[in-house]
Image (spheres, helix red, strand yellow):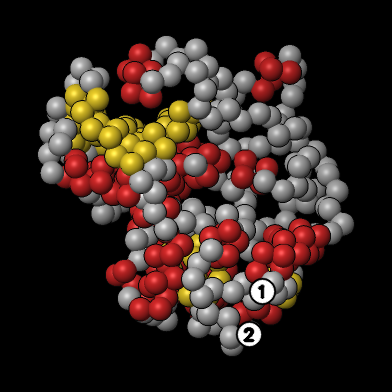
Amino acid sequence: THFNEMLHADGVTISHICDADEERGSQRSTQIEKAQGSRPEFKTDLRRILDVPSVDFVTIATPNHWHALGGIWAMQAGKDAYIEKPVCHNIAEGTALIAAARKYDKMCQVGTQCRSSQAVIDAVSFMNAGGIGDVKFARGLCYKRRKSIGPLGDYPIPGNVDFNLWSGPAPYTNPKVTREQFHYDWHWQRLYGNGDLGNQGPHQTDIARWGLGLDSHPISVISYGGRLGYQAERDDSSYVDAGDTANTEVSIYDYGDKCIVFETRGLSVNDSSDDELNRLFDSTEGNKVGVVFYGSQGYVVQRQYDYCIAFDKDFNMIKEFKGSGDHFGNFVAACRSRDQKALNADVREGHLSAAISHLGNISYYLGEKNHA
């Protein structure tokens, strides 16, 4: 996605590609060469790219455990940074990223692209104007089927991967690779990822926090759930999945007079018995990924990145909101204007929303209520 956005951005040339997987990096370089006419230089070590004076900004779409360090290094080297969500792997990293952006006066945009979605912008404005009355509660949903990632085991490091560079700030485990699919499934191992609460979640929790006008961490958090169902699916009570993040989780965030709830449902998403959600999403089957705002006079539902809808209390549609946006273009424009306030998703906003995921996971891992 980052490559496609950059290739369509006015006046932007992709000069370098960095990937700890040499095969994937070379493939990307070839794809980009065909699209833009010049081949980006490929490196496996980000530091060698940051040494290049002509590089103006970097975009970071690594595993989560690399997000903050890569962004901080980039800004220390005089580059602006666009960082995928979650902007950090833990709360301390988010604080450090904000400090770096302010210290070095760099643009640091987070990939929560709904901040640039016209549909969501208009829906939030509608709520702020009293469109559904008093709004105190938002419910984020990640009802998305996630299958088992295979048994916990001892797997080979792919020969084309520099595992030292891939691991970066993450500690080595013994064995070093415990999942069958090396790429992507790191999302479900907490040393590298944050589960779906930290994968899909930051999009929805960011919208929820934005719509409710919340500009701080919650007062307290409680999460409950587990990595459930895979033993039953395999009919094997001794099965141990390689993932250690929750596939089923409910997190409740107390902000005093307002509240956010985020729900992860990674097992069956069909035959839903939740009549309210079935009406609001117009479906009893399949994924439900979005946000529901509950007002005293109705609901606003974010169904897609470019589509929201408002209902009255009887579930009658009263207004639709449509339109996408150019989130990456917003970042490029801010890089040129040197105005951090022009960013639609400045690093501080990304940090506050990522922290919702991190606090929820902390509560889940500890098994107790967590006070921020």
Residue 38 found in image quarter: bottom right
Q: Which residue carries the number 1 mark? A: 16
Side of 36 where 83 appears, left or right: left
Q: Residue at x 47, y 56 (%)?
A: 111
Q: Position of residue 196 (x, y in %)?
A: 53, 39
Can the viewer see residue 168?
A: no
Residue at 50% x, 83% y: name it. Answer: 78
Q: Is residue 207 above or below residue 10?
A: above
Question: Whole-percent x and y of residue 113?
Answer: 42, 53
For image coordinates 28% across by 49% down, the residue present is 121
Estimate how packed mark 1 is, as few (under 14), some (14 to 19) or many (20 or more) residues with alpha carbons within 10 Å.
some
Give the mark, 1 or 2, whose residue is nearer the N terminus: 1
Graded by Cα atoms within 10 Å as few (under 14), some (14 to 19) or many (20 or more), the crowding at tag 2 reads: few
**194 and 268: which one is in front?**
268
Q: Residue at x 19, y 21 (%)?
A: 313
Q: Is residue 184 above or below residue 82?
A: above
Q: Nearer the viewer, residue 302 or 202?
A: 302
Q: Return the mark for residue 228.
A: none
Of the two numbered discs 1 and 2 in the rendering, the one whose residue sits closer to the viewer: 1
Residue matched to label 2 = 52
Q: Is residue 155 above or below residue 237?
A: below
Q: Quadrant of the N terminus?
A: bottom right
Q: Are marks 1 and 2 in contact (CB under 8 Å)?
A: yes
| Mark-to-mark CA distance, 1 and 2 | 10 Å
Q: Is residue 263 visible?
A: yes
Q: Is residue 142 left or right of residue 149?
A: left
Q: In terms of secondary structure, where does tag 2 sit? A: loop
Q: At label 1, which amino acid type do we have?
A: His
SS of the residue under disc 1: strand
* Residue type at tag 2: Val
